[in-house]
Structure formats: C-alpha cells, structure tokens
Image (cartoon, rainbow, N blue to C red):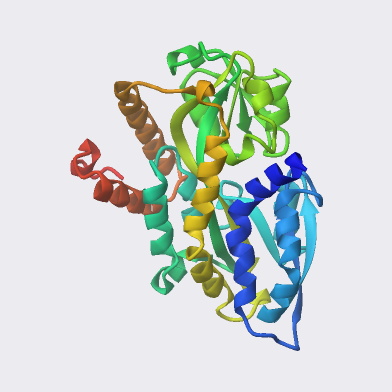
Amino acid sequence: MKQIQQRIKAAAVVAASTAAFASFNVNADALDRKFCIFDPIGNNGPLFNVMKSAKPAALKWGVNLELSAYTDEKIASEDFKAGQCDAVLLTGTRAREYNKFTGSLEALGAIPGDQEMQMILQTLNQPKASQLMTSGNYEIAGILPAGAIYLFLRDRNINSVEKLQGKKIATLDYDQASLTMVRHVGASVVGASSANFAGKFNNGSVDAAYAPAVAYTPLELYKGVSPDGGVFDYKLAQMNFQIVIHQDKFPSGFGQKVREYSAARYTEAYEIVSTAEAEIKPEHWMRPKKEEVEGYDKLLREVRISLRDEGVYDGKALKLMRKVRCKTNPQNAECAENRE
C-alpha cells in the first residue's frame, strides 16, 4: 500500500492535465485518438494510471482516447512522430524537438524557483501566447510543472563543481545541453535515458545523477543516496512534462482549453512537489554557500548563452525567462547586461 501511495504522489504532478479532460461537453461523435504516455513503470505506472482514469471524461471533449504506455520515452516520441500516436506525453527536454520554445523551459539555471516558473506558465497559457505553443502541425497542449532538478550524489564529499571532475554522471544522451554541461565541469558522460538513469545511480554504475524530487521515492533514489551520499540543494533546472498533439487530429481550440484549465491547477501541483521534496531526509540535503550559488548561477548562464548560440535553446524563451528573473530579483547583475 505504501508503494502505491508513493507512486500516486509522484503521478499527481501531471494530474492537472488529466482533470482538464472533464471540462468539455459530451460529444456523441467522439473522435478516436491514440494517446501515447511515457511512464518508466509502464501500464501499471503512476502516469499511465492517472491518464487512464481520465479516459471517460475525455469523451466529454469529443475525443475517445486509446491509451498506450511506453517505458522508453524515445520510442514513444518516434511513434508519435511517425503518426502512430495522435498525442504523446513527454518530458520537456524530449519535447524540444517538437517545439524549441517550450523545450527551452528546462534550460539550465534559467528558472530559479517555483514563483518564476508559475509566472512563465501563466504567461504562456494566455491565448495571445498560443502561437508560441505551435510549431508546424505540432501543438503543446499542456505544460505540467514537475519541480526543480537536483544533483543526486553517492558520495557527499563531492560538494563542489571542482570535485565533479572525473566523476561519472548519468546523462541523457539525447540532450545536447546536458552533455555540454557535464563535459564543461570535467565529469564523464555515462549515457542514460529517463527510464534507466535511476538504476545506474542506485547500483553504483555512476557517481551522480540528476532528477526532480518527485522521482526520489518512486524510483528509489534513496538507495543510491544512502548511506554516504546526498542531494545537492541547487536547482539545476525546472522539469516539466508536455502534452504534444498533432494539431489537425483534434477539435479546434482543444490545446488552448487544456492549457487554461491546467493553469488553474498549478498551485495544487506545486503542493505535491513540496511534499516530495519533504520526503528527502534533512540529513541528505547538501546546502551550498551563498557565494557558491552565485558562482553556479554565472556558470550556468554562460552555458545557456553558449547553447543558444549553438541553436540548442530558443532565444525568445531565454529572454522571457531573464525578464521574469529580473522581475523577481531586479538587483541581479544580469539585468543590466541584457545578454539573454
């Protein structure tokens, strides 16, 4: 029972989108559409079960969803791209190939906290921002916050960037930004996916891995952290899930309605993220000094700018995130430089 409860907690981060399915009127001429859902645990996993529970309500939207679970996010994405799926649930980084703007919301160090993330999402959920949600026939029909991404370490003596040199880090090998960052700090890339990084960390194949707190209990990252490791309390990025649809396969206005409804549920989602972070034992948190945090902020900023110039990140997205950072912290030195 405890394990089930833990998985439900993690899955609830995406429940906001699921609940959105209930806001439409019944349509007798429902469209049959296939919704492919990435869930590392499969069709018994939390993400899939939440989506499955929404299927009856989806009919009210005029869409009869056929749900299919994928434990491999890459295959889910490829099937979507090939037209075998009409909609797909992916991590924000994986979704970048369908929308560079929204895919840049997970840019390294670009969103320092929940307040800034909520401000950005509220902006993007407005109808006037709908053009940013569409790229060709792909539309982002929902962005679901999953909380900050932290560095998980098997040895808490690795408490600085300098000490990461030569260490093995489980790295999403399809994410150019992660590859660049790991190599930038002198660590070794160990290719991993969202489905297997936790196993590599827990069995000691790598020295470190990065993940949001909502993954800590369901993926049993505490096994890798114990007994000598820790969780470095610095927000590397803000993770999110994104629902991507083939726009022409759904009723007009479908994506906007989902985004607006989801926006009303973000507070609830963040309460769940806070609960997940509280599940990490206090003794496992590793707190960097203020001057160290400032140094990391500068480091990630330079990496972001470099990745923008290489075409990995979207310049408009970085500019929006800088404006939000400067609104909440106008004394920040970057606000006078305008480099993003």
**Figure quadrant of the C terminus:** top left
Which image quadrant is residue 338 in?
top left
Q: Nearer the viewer, residue 138 or 210?
A: 210
Residue 327, percent from left and from top: 25, 50
Q: Residue at x 62, y 53 (%)?
A: 12
Q: Is residue 48 above or below residue 193?
A: below
Which image quadrant is residue 32 in?
bottom right
Q: Is residue 236 above or below residue 100?
A: above
Q: Is residue 212 above or below residue 43?
A: above
Residue 219, percent from left and from top: 69, 35
Q: Nearer the viewer, residue 147 or 179?
A: 147
Residue 184 appears in view = yes
112 left or right, relative to 67:
left
Q: Is residue 19 above or below residue 109?
A: below
Q: Residue at x 41, y 70 (%)?
A: 126
Q: Residue at x 52, y 70 (%)?
A: 261
Q: Residue at x 70, y 19 (%)?
A: 205
Which image quadrant is residue 175 in?
top right
Q: Residue furthest bottom?
A: 28
Q: Nearer the viewer, residue 9 or 309?
A: 9
Q: How many marks?
A: 0
Residue 260, percent from left and from top: 49, 70
Residue 91, percent from left and from top: 61, 49
**Figure quadrant of the N terminus:** top right
Residue 35 appears in view = no
Q: Nearer the viewer, residue 264 or 303?
A: 264
